[in-house]
């Protein structure tokens, strides 16, 4: 099952990065979103990030132009249907993802593999709502996609071996490394990472430390390249909250309860870097802690 074309649904932080690496690896890419602004921003960002790679002599100008030439953007979800592999990277909300897969079904080729970049939602449950649970799996990139080496591949209960191998060969072609995970809430990386971020927010909420001291303590005390609050801003606080809710609901354990302060930031629309404000304010030259 050789993959030549890849459809990506959602052109946000993750979708643009996924389009970037897939086009650079030689796949024909169809990138869709419900927002023309998101598509325009994604195209501009991919161009800028490829240009940076040219500047660092990681790729040459011809490779950049070829990659840009392989990306087609569209507002029509149906245009994504006739690709060999679809990677859904829309907002982390199960109803949104279910509606996307339902709307895609009439437009798919019989062999199209469906995947989701979800950070936490059950692959088995998403798959069960489609006509091809055996051709459905989790394809979980890390942020920022062009930089991060890992892709988690998550098998649903029905995923067949051929689908797994086809997805694994795409990960290899992207020059990335696959880690396989079972389909339990938040898989491996976020099962471990998000409770740590949530605990950092509790540490802030309870006044144990402020934004600066918490991030500095974790950077210098545990050799993490970023502090947990800085990382939360980078991921998106809405995504962090959504993952904590999935862990809390899916594992029914109070140790996963989302910190009320995290909820408050999301209610304020302070979602981190993507909205210019989160645990830090990014509107000036330098990020300034908001607490
Ligand atoms: P984002 O908010 O930056 O982008 C989501 C995009 O989806 C937006 O452009 C939005 O317009 C679009 N969208 C919403 N509904 C849509 C629909 N019906 N059809 C098409 N497009 C639609 O979010 P993101 O950070 O890119 O996250 C996307 C997915 O990737 C989520 O499932 C998230 O859990 C996952 N993920 C995120 C990270 C991260 O660090 N941010 C890492 C790994 C995986």
Image (cartoon, rainbow, N blue to C red):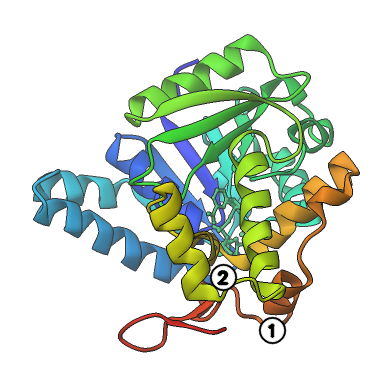
Q: CA distance from mark 1 to mark 2?
A: 22 Å
271 or 220, which lies in front? 220
Residue 270's spot in the image, x, y percent?
Answer: 61, 79
Q: Residue at x 36, y 63 (%)?
A: 43
- Whether the residues at callouts 1 and 2 have beta carbons within 8 Å, the answer is no
Where is residue 55 shown, x and y percent of the image? 10, 56
Q: Which residue occupies 41% across, 56% down? A: 219
Q: Nearer the viewer, mark 1 or mark 2?
A: 1
Residue 1 x/y as whole percent: 50, 15
**Would you place residue 192 above or below residue 109 in this image?**
below
Q: Quadrant of the C terminus?
A: bottom right
Q: Quadrant of residue 173?
A: top left
Which residue is identified by label 1?
A: 268
Residue at horizontal 35%, vertical 42%?
Answer: 21
Element type where label 1 sits in the image: loop
Q: Quadrant of ligand 1?
A: bottom right
Left or right, 73 with reference to 284: right
Disc 1 C-beta below 8 A from ligand 1: no
Residue 190 appears in the figure: yes
Residue 35, disc: 2
Q: Is residue 37 above or below residue 138?
A: below
Q: Is mark 2 within 8 Å of ligand 1?
A: yes
Total tally of numbered discs in the picture: 2
Mark 2 Cα within 10 Å, few/some/many (few <14, many 20+)?
Answer: some
């Amino acid at each position: 099952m050789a993959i030549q074309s890849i459809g990506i649904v959602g052109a946000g932080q993750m979708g643009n990065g996924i389009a970037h690496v897939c086009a650079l690896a030689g796949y024909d890419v169809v990138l869709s979103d419900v927002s023309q602004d998101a598509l325009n921003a994604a195209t501009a960002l991919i161009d800028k990030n490829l240009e940076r790679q040219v500047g660092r002599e990681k790729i040459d100008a011809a490779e950049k132009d070829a990659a840009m030439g392989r990306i087609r953007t569209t507002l029509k979800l149906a245009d994504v249907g006739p690709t060999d592999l679809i990677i859904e990277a829309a907002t982390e909300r199960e109803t949104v993802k279910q509606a996307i897969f339902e709307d895609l079904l009439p437009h798919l080729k019989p062999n199209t593999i469906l995947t989701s970049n979800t950070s936490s939602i059950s692959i088995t449950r998403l798959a069960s709502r489609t006509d091809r649970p055996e051709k459905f799996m989790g394809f979980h990139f890390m942020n920022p996609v062009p930089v991060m080496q890992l892709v988690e591949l998550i098998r649903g209960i029905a995923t067949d071996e051929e689908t797994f191998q086809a997805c694994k060969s795409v990960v290899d072609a992207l020059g990335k490394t696959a880690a396989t995970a079972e389909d339990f809430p938040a898989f491996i990386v976020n099962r471990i990472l998000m409770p740590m971020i949530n605990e950092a927010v509790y540490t802030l909420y309870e006044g144990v430390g402020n934004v600066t001291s918490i991030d500095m303590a974790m950077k210098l005390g545990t050799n993490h390249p970023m502090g947990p609050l800085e990382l939360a801003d980078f991921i998106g606080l809405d995504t962090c909250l959504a993952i904590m809710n999935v862990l809390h609901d899916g594992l029914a354990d109070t140790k996963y309860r989302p910190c009320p302060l995290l909820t408050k930031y999301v209610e304020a629309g302070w979602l981190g870097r993507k909205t210019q404000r989160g645990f830090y304010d990014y509107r000036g030259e330098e990020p300034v802690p908001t607490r």
